[in-house]
Amino acid sequence: MGAGMAQLEGYYFSAALSCTFLVSCLLFSAFSRALREPYMDEIFHLPQAQRYCEGHFSLSQWDPMITTLPGLYLLSVGVVKPASWIFGWSEHVVCSIGMLRFVNLLFSVGNFYLLYLLFRKVQPRHKAASSIQRILSTLTLAVFPTLYFFNFLYYTEAGSMFFTLFAYLMCLYGNHKTSALLGFCGFMFRQTNIIWAVFCAGNVIAQKLTEAWKTELQKKKEERLPPIKGPFSEFRKILQFLLAYSMSFKNLSVLFLLTWPYILLVFLFCVFVVVNGGIVIGDRSSHEACLHFPQLFYFFSFTLFFSFPHLLSPGKIRAFLSLVWKRRIQFFMITLVSLFLVWKFTYAHKYLLADNRHYTFYVWKRVFQRYEIMKYLLVPVYIFAGWSIADSLKSKSIFWNLMFFICLFTVTVPQKLLEFRYFILPYVIYRLNIPLPPISRLVCELGCYAVVNFLTFYVFLNKTFQWPDSQDIQRFMW
């Protein structure tokens, strides 16, 4: 029976992947017909890749407007160049816009498979329905609107996702040297991916801490020690445990032996930052780091919107209100701190205010700019979203949650520009780790993603416009 179920799951997976790739190819064809020339950031990425394709790798040939490392271009050349040798195609064909964009479509197939493998590894397999739930979850995340859209343009999103997911999978299988190497590849696509390599190391550390914490709790239970009481008793207990754990040379040496490949990668990253004079290469004027705390709130809202079947329900709202009433002093303090962070640390990047091709421009203009008070009125929504996200992750250990939220904070808060693309990776990591939702919720989520994707693609391909001072066709996008 088990072998039969596994075989059936294999058929379902193959059908889901094949159908998704077929639809993606049809959409890719529509994109290629509509976009004969580079669009948006492609005006930097595509010519750079074509220079690499022609064998021009010198720094003098580098476009100073590009802020990421050349991972995408190097890998693209490694994929398309053999085609010219195997099929005898000319360089004009293999280095064309369409061929280079197609590299991301290949990445999307890899991402689909990696998501499936991750769901199999992360989620326990003890229910008959869980194979359908895993495949539906994989399909849903594979067509996650902000990720899926960039499979059709020559951007770094698909490749960045591929190497980060691959590194995470290898980490979960305990192959940490391979994981760190894949983390380096992810870093070559986008520098901030170093945070997700750290997250992989954090995963290992969290596992060891959880084991030690369970032993500690068992010991206290047997010794029948009086519990620590007070509003922050749990926090104090964990802090005391972490201090005691970190004082042990044996514990630290075990962690070092497990995580040294990631430590080496972080060391190389630090060398890069020192030599480069910062994390950004090329045009740094538009990518200055700052403490943009509301970015965390925007991510919570983004996650609440896209995961509403799992995070938003009358029962969840009642549970939240009940908790707020029970711990009203703590929630009052959290609200005050949140209001202060919104007041003092809200920034509007010049791109956000000027570029009307992105959806974030309209969110900012019609919500935050029109009604100044709105950014404060939304604080209760942010707090509910944050609580709901943390509540959905309660099946994970306290130390896993600590590692995840530290990485989430580090990857979102320093970004001045509000850009939905920056939320893709943390969202996918989050979504992979919540318990498998019921099939009805997954169908609802998949249906909503399909509608959002249809509207996004329809608007992008058909609702074009022009700026008064330019003849170029402009399109709305994420």
Image (spheres, helix red, strand yellow):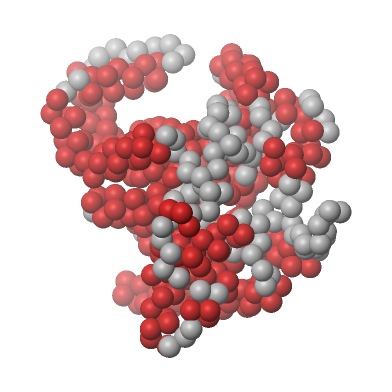
Quarter occupied by the N terminus: bottom left
Residue 149 location (% of width, % of height): 61, 61
* Outermost residue, right side: 468
Residue 278 location (% of width, % of height): 44, 35
Q: Left or right: where does residue 403 sit relative to residue 298?
A: left
Q: Nearer the viewer, residue 313 or 146?
A: 146
* Outermost residue, left side: 250
Q: Residue at x 40, y 49 (%)?
A: 187
Q: Residue at x 25, y 41 (%)?
A: 264
* Outermost residue, front side: 60
Q: Is residue 289 above or below residue 448?
A: above
Q: Nearer the viewer, residue 440 or 415?
A: 415
Q: Nearer the viewer, residue 164 or 113?
A: 164
- Quarter of the image holding residue 416? top right
Using the rendered image of the protein, determine whether residue 397 is visible from the camera's viewpoint: no
Q: Is residue 353 above or below residue 332?
A: below
Q: Residue at x 54, y 39 (%)?
A: 284
Q: Left or right: where does residue 223 sit relative to residue 426?
A: left
- Quarter of the image holding residue 291? top right
Q: How many marks?
A: 0
Q: Left or right: where does residue 230 sit relative to residue 286?
A: left
Residue 328 location (% of width, % of height): 60, 17
Q: Residue at x 59, y 15 (%)?
A: 333
Q: Is residue 398 above or below residue 160?
A: above
Using the rendered image of the protein, determine whether residue 100 is visible from the camera's viewpoint: yes
- Quarter of the image holding residue 342? top right
